[in-house]
Amino acid sequence: MDPLLAFGFWSYVLTFAGIYAIFVLGLQIEVGDTGLINFGHVAFMAIGAYAMGLMLTNDVGIWLAIPVALLASAAAGLLLGIPTLRLRADYFAITTIAAGEILRITIQNEQDTTGGTQGLRGASGPWRDVNNDVLDWFDGLGLELDRRVPLLVLVWLVAVLVGLLLVRLGRTPWRRRLRAVREDEDAAAASGTPVLSYKLQSLALGSAIAGLAGVFYTLFSTTLFPENFEPIFTFVGFAILILGGIGSYFGVVLGSIVISFIVSGTRFIDFPLDADKVAALRFVAVGLIIMGMMAFRPQGIFGKKEELHLDA
């Protein structure tokens, strides 16, 4: 059967796209609203994912594990931000990617705790029980659902709720202060805005949202591996941001679906090439999209040109 016509194919692509949408919404807060170029954003997703996985494999209830995982990611954002947010923008970007790699290598070497290169197995087990309960409930109503539907719906429901929350925040003085910091830190400080405090708030919120993406990644995957959280994940997130448009929440949704299809969905399509060449071509395609957008529409499909004036 052609995978493009299979429900399993599209449920996989769209669930992964929803996880990426949540992940990139965190980037929107940091990059689009505050001008923080965070190349280590995936580290906070990893913290949320592994915190969730470790709690579930140690019999902590799933509904308790979720908020704790988000708090862990937010706390990590604060811990990173306190000593680094006074750095110049380019130094901060380099520091974040270094911090992310330190975390990933630490996870890789903590064999006894995280499973190391063998992976943290069984982390999504408790979710399967919840998933089966949902399916049984619908079955009792006479509706037979595919086993992948509950997570797909839940991921996109949460993505929409996070987006609506950010839209709501966008109409408050808080977001206007973030943008003042983005445009000119000195002017914002002179007008009485505590610049460091607002940067920390942005980084903590963005990290918590990344942690939420990590929570869903744990439920989505059967095993967590350190290589799932390499810097390329963040760079693909930036590709989504560039494609959809900085400052556009709807752009995040569209960009996530398009890029997720290229990065993940094409794995299920039979190409007359070796697997390693197909994998390389995926990122060539993403690179070409970025180059095309930067050349012809740098603000993205739904972005605005004024959103590009980030403080360098």
Image (spheres, rainbow, N blue to C red):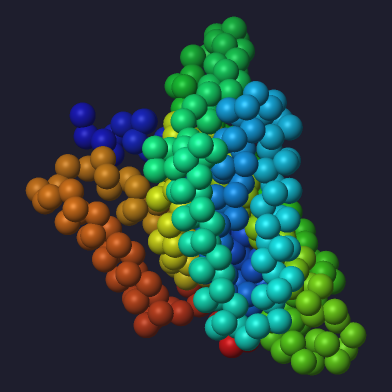
For the point 57% across and 11% down, the residue is 136
Residue 1 lies, in percent from the top left, at: 21, 29
Q: Is residue 6 visible?
A: yes
Q: Quadrant of residue 40?
A: bottom right
Residue 247 lies, in percent from the top left, at: 61, 70
Q: Horizontally, is 297 left or right of 32 in the view?
A: left
For the point 74% across and 87% down, the residue is 185
Question: 163 and 19: which one is in front?
Answer: 19
Q: Is residue 138 visible?
A: no
Q: Horizontally, is 77 left or right of 128 in the view?
A: right
For the point 79% across and 72% down, the residue is 198
Residue 94 lies, in percent from the top left, at: 52, 76
Question: 22 and 214: which one is in front?
Answer: 214
Q: Is residue 168 above or below residue 297?
A: above
Q: Is residue 284 above or below residue 165?
A: below
For the point 74% across and 71% down, the residue is 82
